[in-house]
Each structure stands twice: as structure tokens, then as C-alpha cells.
Amino acid sequence: MQFDIKNVVRPHILNLAPYSSARDEYTGKEGIFLDANENPIGSATPENWNRYPDPYQWAIKEKLAPLKGCRPSQIFLGNGSDEPIDLVIRLTCEPKVDNIIILPPTYGMYEVSASVNNVQIQKIPLTVDYQLNVEAILEAINSKTKLIFICSPNNPTGNLIDREAILQIIENFQQGIVIIDEAYNDFSDEPSFIPSLDEYPNVMVLQTFSKAWGLASLRLGMAFAQEGLIQLLNKIKYPYNINGLTQKLLVENIDNVTFVEESVKTLNENRTQLEKELSELAIVEKIYPSDANFLLVKFNDAKAVFDYLIEHKTIVRDRSKVILCDNSLRISVGTKEENKVLMNYLHQYQS
């Protein structure tokens, strides 16, 4: 079977007439704008935000494409990565009929978005060393499987998923879309799948500005895919899904790759040091290998450690109830000063 986006998308969406906004009908920058019922006087803020923003964020995409090794037309920008996750499920999955495959332990929003859309979920757990069970995944695919979500580096475990295993899934799942979530890719040496999109039309890659770029509060996620899929995502998204302030700040600062590179270098160094110090604690049973900006750490009593840290206003994530993460806390890598505070409290707890 050869991948064809038309066979994956819900039929009624292919024929759907999308909403046409004022900025769809006139894309020019100059003129007297009396078409969108905006306030022509200005804004209630010192800077004017009274005009609707570009619904397709072309200024960002033109600058972003060379950084990512793709074409602007292969980029979708969303309100965080959560927006394209939700949209691709709505685009492809008929409620109560179709299903997606997720690979726990993994990012929780894949399951939440599917559940909100009343889409069935197949869970194929990772192996004990947090890798793909390729045989089980391929066996789980049925005629109603539309999407497979793979997170690499994985959240909450931090490890890279074996690339050859991912390629096996891509090559053997031509009836649907393989979504590769690379939110933490900046912290690893693994090449992105983005430059390979022309080779693999059944792949969608997710990335984010929230981690290495330090822009979590601006809520901007990225999806990369073949043009046909991007056009369909644009067809069903809200008209102005990325606000004007976020667009302005990105256009002005997207060339600041030096900040990203220096942040990644510093956080990776801090991660190495934190891992070393944690490994010296008797209360720590295991630290899982990480290619992300966090560590998954197994304690002898994770709940007690978590509660102690909360008492001292040091907040980590308790992942103990997640499959294959018994007694484990996920600890984001902080600054040197923050990591020192964390370690001081852990030493106090231990003693």
C-alpha cells in the first residue's frame, strides 16, 4: 500500500468549505481596513493590537524553514504542540470508529486529545528499557488505525527511541500517519526527521518553542509534514490561532539561535552534573539515561521524597503511577543554583 493523504482524512473534511477570514480575502499590508470589524481607534494597551494577525504566520515560517531544513509550506504553527495533536486526531479519526496507537509511558496529551474526541486508544507499552516493541505495534494495527504517536526523546523517560525501530514503523504503516514528537530534540545529537519529510509522506514531526527556545509562555508549537497535510490542518484550525504579540516577538527574535545553542549547552552540562550528584545518594536506586532537559529518577520511596520537596517549595513531577515508572520522579534540569537547592534538600531528607 502506498500512502495517500486522501485515504487517511475523514471524507467530509475533504469536502469541507473552510471559514474565510478577512485576512484570507485581502492579504495586503497597506490600505484602509474596513473589512474585519476591528477597532480603528487603537487599543486599550500602550502598543496597538487592534488589527487581526496573519492567520498563516508566513513571516515566521519564511524565517523558520531554513533553520529546520524544510519549505515554509511544510510548516504548521499551533497554540503549543497540543493544537496540532488535537487537530490531526480530529482530521483523521471518526469518533467511536477509528483508533490511534500510543506507546506508554509517553506524553499524556495524546491520550487526552483522543479521549476528548471520543477516539479509541490502543496502548502498546514500551519495553523495559523504554524502546519500541515493534512486533507488538505492527500486530496492533488494524483497518481502523489512523495514527501512531512516537515521542523521541521520550517524555517522561528522557531517552531517544531507536531510529531504525521508528523507520520500521514508518515503512510498515502506510495506511495512516506516524507522528514523531521531537519536543526535546534540541537537547540530543539525534538528527530530526524534518529533512526526510519528502521521503516519508506519512510522517508528521512535532517540535516546540517552549523548551530550548525558552518561550513556554508564548505558546507556540510546530508541526512539519507534506504540504497536503499542512493545508488540511490549516483548513480546520481556528482562523487566528496564533496571536499577534507571539508572532511579532518570534519574527523579531527567531534569528537568536545563539541563545538556543548556549541554553542547550548549559542545560546539558547541568544535567550531567545533576546526574552525577544524584547517583551519589543512597535514596536513589536508578537514574535513567536522558537526551532531554530532565531526568527520570527512581527513588526507594518516591512519594515521601516528592512530599518532602513540596514542603520546601521545590517542585518536581511524581511519575510513580505511570506504567514502567514505579517509584520515579521526573526532575527538570534547573540552573546551577536551583540544582544546588534541590540537592541540599535531598541530602537533608536522606539524613
Image (cartoon, rainbow, N blue to C red):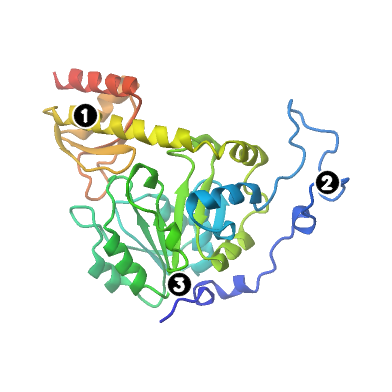
Query: Compared with residue 285, is residue 31 higher up or lower down, i.e. above or below?
Result: below
- In the picture provided, is 293 more to the left or to the right than 274? right
Q: Nearer the viewer, residue 171 or 64?
A: 64
Say if mark 3 contacts mark 2, CB within 8 Å: no
Amino acid type of disc 1? Ala
Of labels 3 and 2, earlier in sequence is 2
Image quadrant occupied by the C terminus: top left
Disc count in the image?
A: 3
Which type of secondary structure does the marked residue at label 1 adopt? helix
Query: What is the distance, in whole Å, between disc 3 and disc 2 at their CAs?
Result: 48 Å
Q: Residue at x 55, y 58 (%)?
A: 71
- Pinpoint residue 14: horizontal percent, then vertical percent: 61, 73
Callout 1: 10 Å neighbours few (<14), some, many (20+)? few
Amino acid type of disc 3? Val
Residue identifier under label 2: 30
- Pinpoint residue 158: horizontal percent, then vertical percent: 29, 45
Residue identifier under label 1: 304
Which type of secondary structure does the marked residue at label 2 adopt? loop
Q: Residue at x 40, y 33 (%)?
A: 263
